Every structure is written in C-alpha cells, then in structure tokens.
Image (cartoon, coloured by chain):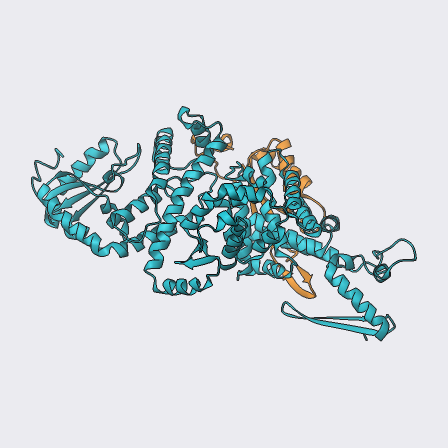
Amino acid sequence: MKKIEAIIQPFKLEDVKEALKAAGVDGMTITEVRGHGRQKGHKEVYRGQEYTVDLLPKVKVELVISASRLEEVLRVVLGAARTGKIGDGKIFVYDVAEAIRIRNDDRGEIAL
Amino acid sequence: MEHLAPEVPAGLAVLAVGGYGRQELFPYSDVDVCLLVDNDKIAEEKRSNISSFLQALWDANLRVSQSVRTAPECCELHDTNIELNVSLIDQRFLAGDTDLYARLEPKLRKFYENQRVSLARHLCRLARSRHAQYQNTVFHLEPQIKEGPGGLRDVHLLEWFHKLEISGLHDISWRDVEEPRLFLSQVRCFLHYRSRRDNNNLSFEAQDELAEQKYSRLESADAWMREFFRHVRAIEGAASRAMDAIESKHNVLLAGFREWRSRLSNGEFTVSKDRVLLKSSQTLDTDPAAVLRLYHFVARHGIALSLDCERRIMEAYPKLREHFAQAGAIWPQVREILLQPHAAMALRAMQESGVLRLLFPEWEGIEHMVTRDFYHRYTVDEHTIVTIENLQKLARTSEPGHRRFSTLLTEIEDLSILRAALLLHDVGKGARTGNHSVESVRMARETLERLGAPEKAREMILFLIDQHLALSAAMTGRDLDDPATARMLAEKVGTIEGLRYLTLLTYADVSAVNTTALSPWRLEQLWRVYLRTHHELTRELQTDRIQLPGEEGGERESFLKGLPVRYLRTHSEPEIRMHLDLEARRRETEVALDIRKTEGGYALTVLAKDRLHLVA
C-alpha cells in the first residue's frame, strides 16, 4: 500500500476530488494548511508598504491506495492539480505498513 | 443494605445525593450516593463491606458514583471540589444509622447558612464557565440539553439558589421555569432510552424522531425545535438574571460601576441595578414609538432591559404591532440603533421580545431556524446576530491576523450599511427556495423601501446581500494569482468602498458559522482576496480613462473626463464633490489646496493644471 500526500492550490481541490472520484478513489483526508516551498512566499505591496507573505494557504490531500494503482492515481492527481505555474505544490509518496478498519478489525488493502 | 447492615449496625448511613437526592433520576443517570461514616476508622475497618455493597449496585446495572465522608467533611467548604458541597444540597437519607444522620442534619443546615454567599458565587462561576463552553447561547443546531445554556443544569442552579435561600432573586418566576423543566425532562428520558446511555445531545436524528412522537403534537422537526428553543430560552433567561443579581450584589467594584451607570438615566428611562426601566409604566401604551428609543438606549450604553421592562413590552405588544404596521419611514431611527457601539445587544433584546419581527416581518421565517449542514453550529437568527457581535469584537481586537481587518472597519463610510446588510443577509433562508441570496435580496428590498432607507444606502445593502458569498467562493474556488480572478472580483465590487464592506461582511459571516470557521488559513485567504481586488481597483491603467459622450458637458463631466476609471471606484461621492469645489477654486487661483484631519493623519489634496516638472 502507498500513501499519497499532495499539497495543492486551494482552488484545485474540487478538480482533484472530482478526478479521483472518477478514477474510483473515494477515501481521502483534506486539511487546510499553510506553508511555502522553494518559492518562499512572496512580497505584497499594500498602500505603498511592502511586506512578505511567507506562509501561503494550500490544501493537503492524503490518500492511501493499493501499490499497484500508484502510477495511475499519481497521473490523475498531477493532471487535475497542475496549472504549470509556480506554487502548484508537491506530491509525496510513502510506503504504508498496515491499514486497519477500526470498526471490524479488517486489515490490509481490504480496509482501504 | 444487606451487605452493610449486619456488619455495620451503627456509625454508617447511606445518603442519596445529586439527582438521586432530588428524586430526579433519568433512565441512564449516574446514581450518586454518599456513605456517611461516623469516623475514618469505621470506613477503614469496613472497607470490604463497603466494596461488596457498591459491587452489588454495579451488578444491578446501576452506574454508581460514590463518596465516603464523615460529618465534618460534609460541612467544610471544598474550594477545589465544590461539586461535593453542591451535591449535598440535594441530600436525602436512604438507610443506615438514623442517629448519625440526625446529628449531621443541623450541622449541614448551619454550614449552608454560613456559606450561602460563598457557595452561590461558586455556583455562578461554574455555571458561567459551563455556558462559555457552549458560546453562551442556547441556539445550537444540536444542543446539549443538560449542560448547555438553558439546559437542566440551569434549572438545578435555580433550585440550589432557592434551597440556599439566596435573597434578592425576586425576578425569578418559578412558573416560567416549571413547564420548560418538564419538557426537557421528557426529552432527556427519550434521549436516554433512544441511545441506551446517559446521552444528552439532541442530534438531528433525535429531533426528527421526537417530532414524530405522538405526544409532540407538532408537524415537523423545525416546529418542534422552535418549541424546544422557547423552553430553553425561558430557563436560560431566569438563570442569567439570578446570576447577574448574585454577582453584582456581592461585588464592590461592580456595585460602584452600577452606581455610576445609574447616572445615565434620562427623562424616559431609568438605570437601576444595571438594568433599564421605563420611568412611566404607561409610556409604551401612549407612545409606542418610544420602544425604538428604548432599544437605542440599550445599543448606546450596553445596558440590558429589566425584567419589568421586558414584561411591559410584552403587554404593549399588540399596540406595538399596530404601530409598526403603519409606521412608515423609520429608517433614521433604525439606522441610529445600528450605528451604536452595542447594536448587537439591542438587536438581541429586540429579537427576544419579538420587536425585531415587527420591524422586519421577514425575520420571522429564520427565527430559531435549524439548517442542517456540516459547518453551521447555530440557528439562522443566532448566526445573524453573532455576525454583528463579531464585528463589534473586531473593532477591539489586538490579534495581528485580525488587526488588518479592523483597520478596514475604521475606513468604511457608514457602519449602519454593513450592519443592516448583515442583519438581512440570510433572511431568504426562511423561504427555503434553495437560493437564499436571491430571496434575501428580494425580502430586504421590500423591507428597506418600507422603512424609507435612502436609495444609495439601499443599493449598497442589496449589493452586499446579493454578493455575500462571492469572496468566500473566490477564497476556495478561484486562482487568486490569476489576473482574471482580480478583474472578475473588481468588476463585482465596483468600488473600494464596496470591497471594504464586502470583505468585512465576509469576515463577520464566516466567523459566525462556528468558533473555528475563521481559521488562520481562511483569514489569510480572505486577506489575499481583498489585496488582489484592491490592487486591481487601484492600479493605474492608461487605457482605462473615463470616457464621456460628446464634447459638451457640465462642470462635473469636464472634470471627470480623462481621469483614470479607478478615480470613480476609489473616491466616494462627498470626496468627488469636494474635488469639484476645489477645481472651481483652482480656476481662479491656479492652485487649490485642501487639508483635513482623517483617522490617524491628515489628507492633503492639491489641484493644479498639469505642466512639466509639476511635482519635481
């Protein structure tokens, strides 16, 4: 099993959700996060005063899938989240040791 | 008792305390008992008997909550465990050593006599912090019927004050509380049986099921919840009045402040014990319009109405209804209330007395209205009043993330426009058509016309209501770095003033959804939306110049022609008029100056004909 953690632009969330749903991925966790990558925020000018906005609002999407579907799901997320501009975000992939459904003790991929 | 009695013929008694003591056990309530022992030695020696006694109770499926105390322990104040003293207020003898109990009783009575003030204040402190956990409002979509404001715990609070013989609580009417208490008790029994545990949360599903019960006599969950809120409001009102009376009576500082506030009394209203009273009992009958002056007084000074005053409003209600049905253009009076520093307090009082409904009949549709969605925590009317309260709080905030919004608040032209828009932004939800913004605009238009609001104010209020979701939608659904987003938003808001109003309205609206809705994330996104749109509205665009048809035109047209389009967006009508006057002077004197004091500085306007190196 693999865990995909995608930090994306907030306005791309609906597109990513729709695309994942169409690909048969239903379960996910969404968090509103703030942070910066290589772009390190940017400068804003308001009424002649310049100030740095270093933590930009983003959305974190987390999902766990069967390892066999990894490339397919990554393509779906990439396709839906990309604008081609700076600030599109990042995707991280992790190995998952175990998944357990709390309700009935199901373990492994069946619990996803 | 068979476990205890043979072994402990003397020196031990079992008392029912808490809800059991009050003889008010609910199906899955804890059973509170106090094991009264003559001395610690007996408790130690008979430990195993006591254990098997408690075990037997647990085996009988009772959830026992027990304490073992000597008489002196029962009669000392436990500052850190005040609940023990409180539970003993309701004590009742069950079994055991009657002599031991007979010795305790007079001591306990004396203890409560001596400590009544201290205990009452402790009870107030506990109740206040309990209410704060529920944001001090009864109007939750899924209320907690025991601990929440207006819940059964508040009835107990009143009963404890009564048992402690606290003086000065004449304002409390037990008749007002008795019916709500029975209603809530039935609901609590239902919830316990329904979930087979001590569950006191009135969930959406439970609301549906309760409304369907034969005894509910109400046709829908909506109607049932309105009935529910009517009852809990009565309890909460009585509990709050009792606590106010106790707290202010025994607080020297507060008493001094109260004394000072009584000087605010005028020809019509008296301030006494930090409450507003009508000087003449006939006022509202002979002059129903005085009711708006009364609420203006509340909005200005932040002093609540006395119970007597509330009753007089209730009595005069038919007269008031008649008056407002043909009152006509009373916008100036309504506006004056909306402009005051404590407007939310007055609106809340108007809502509670039903006067708000007389002013805005559309309000009735959202009164105590439950909307079932994942985010909202309060009823629609409560959400609306909380938006205005949060806007008041914003003016005093010191939190950095919020301060930039409070600056905007100092820059808007007319606070009454923003507050009126907030008051009416969700009234359309009452129509249940699926698009509440459109309905709210339609209803607000009728209301504002009837009240005689001037056209300019009316247009801005209707625009704000119509667009009240626009910035929230952009926060999550639009690419804020895309120039097209800024252009779209700039087109929507039209002017800097419109942007300021809409940003503040969005701030207040989101913050009143639930206590965590305005997260740092949303605060940042809202500010970004504001900034992008502000830049778009203020940036210099050579191509965007004011074009006016024809060569001929008045002074105004020739002045405006050729100025950047943003000039009209960034300047209010009074400013434009001032510039026109300045231009008239300039024509005589070549250069005209205007300097005036503004919030935190001076604004200097210079008008001169353009030439090379003019500002070099």
State the image coordinates of residue A59 (x, y, percent, origin top left): 60, 46
Residue B409 visible, this angle: yes
Judging depth in this view, the residue of A112 and B556 nearest the camera is: B556
Residue at x 38% of width, y 50% of height: B241
Residue B564 rendering spot, x and y as whole percentages: 81, 59
The N terminus of chain B lies in which quarter of the figure? top left
Q: Can residue B526 be seen by looking at this rendering?
A: no
Q: Is residue B505 left or right of residue B515?
A: right
The C terminus of chain B, quarter of image: bottom right
Q: Which chain is orange?
A: A
Judge by depth and name the residue closer to the eye, B529 or B348: B348
Left or right relative to B464: residue B338: left
Q: Nearer the viewer, residue B320 or B148?
A: B320
Q: Colour of chain B?
A: cyan
Residue furthest to the right: B551
Instruction: Please identify the quarter of the rendering in which residue B539 is found.
Output: bottom right
Q: Quadrant of residue B524?
A: bottom right
Q: Residue furthest top?
A: B214
Q: Nearer the viewer, residue B108 or B235?
A: B235
Left or right of residue B231: residue B82: left
Say if B607 sits above or below B466 in the image: below
Q: Where is residue B296 drawn, in percent x and y?
A: 53, 55
Residue B513, percent across and down?
Answer: 54, 45
Q: How many numbered discs?
A: 0
